[in-house]
Image: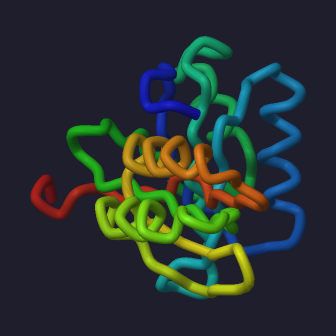
Amino acid sequence: MTSSTPSHTLVVRVENKPGVLARVAGLFARRGFNIVSLAVAPTENVLFSRLTIVVDAESAPIEQVVKQLDKLINVVEIQELAPTESVTRELILATVQVNDGQEDRIMKNIENFEANILNVGPQRIMVSLSGDVDQVDKFEASLEEFGIMEIQRTGTIALPSISNS
């Protein structure tokens, strides 16, 4: 997803029980809502998990998405996070081809983005970067000229900004 794609970020606290994620994903599929990104993790309380769902704004009105989610029995709380009132991050891991003579250019690229080198092998390097979606998109695009061999992105995670509490 590029940062220019209209979307909504929902943080949904759910009971940490088997099948909850399947019910949430099933709801989106049945209603034809497009999930752009989905990240799930336990919370500070082992009884709950937090789902960060980025929804394509063009596939459904956010009010309808929230109403449908609220009907699910294991959903405890739903919060829409405005970009100006939240902190969002995404993680990218990529293995990139490093051909002879490219070492300096790729190292400069990694330094410019303040990315991390995780692993180095013969003619390849594994890097990571954590940042907002726009920064991760730009980093991924910058790696394409070297030849991305493998890539994985986490999807967006988000929390309300503490300056708005």
- Rendering coords of residue 18 (x, y %): 87, 71
- Rendering coords of residue 30 (x, y %): 89, 26
Within the image, what quadrant is residue 85 found in?
A: top left
Can you say whether 35 is above or below 76 in the image? above
Can you say whether 159 is above or below 29 in the image? below
At 38% from the left and 51% from the top, the residue drawn is 132
Comparing 115 with 65, the one in front is 115
Comparing 63 with 145, the one in front is 145
Comparing 106 with 7, the one in front is 106
Q: Is residue 16 left or right of residue 54?
A: right
Can you say whether 92 is above or below 156 in the image? below
At 60% from the left and 12% from the top, the residue drawn is 58
Q: Is residue 51 left or right of residue 3?
A: right
At 73% from the left and 27% from the top, the residue drawn is 34
Residue, far front: 101
Within the image, what quadrant is residue 113 found in?
A: bottom left
Residue, far left: 163
Q: Is residue 13 left or right of residue 159?
A: right
In which quadrant is the N terminus drawn? top right
- Rendering coords of residue 164 (x, y %): 13, 53
